[in-house]
Amino acid sequence: MQTPHLLLAAIALALAGVASAADEAPLGRDVDGLLAHARSHNPDWVAMRMEAEAAAERIGPAGALPDPVLRTELENVTNFGSNASPNLLPARVGSTKYTLMQSLPWWGKRDLRRDVAVAAADESRARATGSWVDVAARIKVAYAQYYQLSRNLQYGREVLDLIERLAGIAQVRYAGGLAPQQDAIRAQVERTAIQSELIAMETERHHAMIRLNTALARGADAPLVPPEMLRPVPPRFDVAALTARLRDNNPELFAEDARIRGAERSRDLTYRNRYPDVTLGVAPMQVGTQVNQWGVMVELNIPLQQSSRRGQEREADKSVEAAQARKTAAANRLVAELSEAVAILEGARRVEGLTATSLLPQAEVTLQAALAGYENGKVDFASALDAQRQIRRARQELVKAQTEQRMRLADIERLIGDEL
């Protein structure tokens, strides 16, 4: 009697699975889906994030007191002077002394150690953020290259269809005695050359898919759907504003800031080591089964090795200076990279505008005129071939300029540490 219910349940589960699979957007259509996948699956980003969390867990222990120490001393375990035999039980020896000790660092040392750990955690978190920014930039660049190769492959196939059309026209004209046999032969040669180029394009596109899948932590031959669109590019760039965002948000500079803070706190801690640490203790004395004596103790380490400490202090000072110089060098390099990326993007934008508004329309008009003229015998075959090559170059220049802009946009976003 329960069989229909089980069948309905199985059908419902199957439909739910189909609906779930349909809801999952295939990868490759746009770059946003690729970034969302990488954020959950890229092992480099996951590893750096876990290291940052591990570094954050070191902050508490860095500022904590060391564990107390309990010392037990058994006096006269041979029971010399009495009739008792040697023993190791506290109540059956001459006396037993218990000492409970707690080490106390000099004032301020614990705070400085915690500050050093905080700076290290901030640096690790910045490195993790920088790792994700680098991964995202690689994905954006790889996707742009994947898009370019896919479009070039599409244009190559369209040109192959065009050559097939020209070859058909040449064959008809040759059969009618209106064109030399050389036209038909050149059409076949051109078709073979384009087919060879298409094979090379397919190989390059496959390599681009491998690079993209590698950045996504997927199998090298995992399927990707054809790309549909490129990311929009802002209409203009304010280099001064971008430079300010770079100085405020760049993960590398943030990590260098954290390194400077850590070096400064380590230097302060080194100078604080001129003062001794203190160990306090309390010591009850057991005789037999009774505790009838109490003692207290104070222990100090004596910082006598002054030459060694001065060397450590000079080392700490140099470490701070090195960290500051490293940040200055990194900032100069990153600002230069930003200016270069913006300049290249703007140049590619101008090339795209010129190609889209002038070169490509002219090439299309020339091609149509050449095809019509060749069919009517007013244009020779060489001119028709030259027209198709011209429009092919124009299309390739257009997609190259579009791709270059997205690649430089990825560089800019990597440098400023944020999306535009």
Image (cartoon, rainbow, N blue to C red):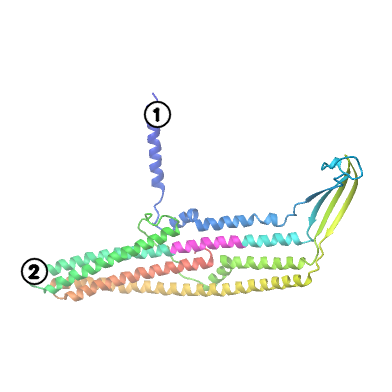
The kind of secondary structure element at disc 1 is helix
Residue 153 in sight from this viewpoint: yes
Task: Name the side, left or right, on which 126 lies relative to 23.
Answer: right
Residue toward you, 128 or 247: 128
Residue 239 highlighted magenta (yes or no): no
Amino acid tagged 2: Ala
Q: Position of residue 194 (x, y in %)?
A: 25, 68
The quarter holding residue 104 reads: bottom right
Q: Which of marks 1 and 2 is nearer the N terminus?
A: 1
The boundaries of the magenta stretch are: 123-140
> Label 1, on which residue?
5
Above or below residue 372? Residue 5 is: above
> Label 2, on which residue?
175
Residue toward you, 62 or 284: 284
Residue 356 in sight from this viewpoint: no
Above or below residue 34? Residue 15 is: above
Task: Name the side, left or right, on which 120 lies relative to 355.
Answer: right
Q: Is the magenta stretch mostly helix, strand or loop?
A: helix
Above or below residue 100? Residue 122 is: below
Q: How far apart are marks 1 and 2 (CA)?
A: 73 Å
Amino acid tagged 1: His
Q: Where is residue 375 in the image (x, y as percent from the top left)?
A: 14, 70
Quick one: which residue is furthest to the top in this view?
A: 1
Mark 2 closeness class: few <14, some 14–19, many ≥20 residues within 10 Å: few
Residue drawn 59% across the image and 57% down it: 52
Residue 133 highlighted magenta (yes or no): yes
The kind of secondary structure element at disc 2 is helix
Q: Position of residue 291 (x, y in %)?
A: 89, 43
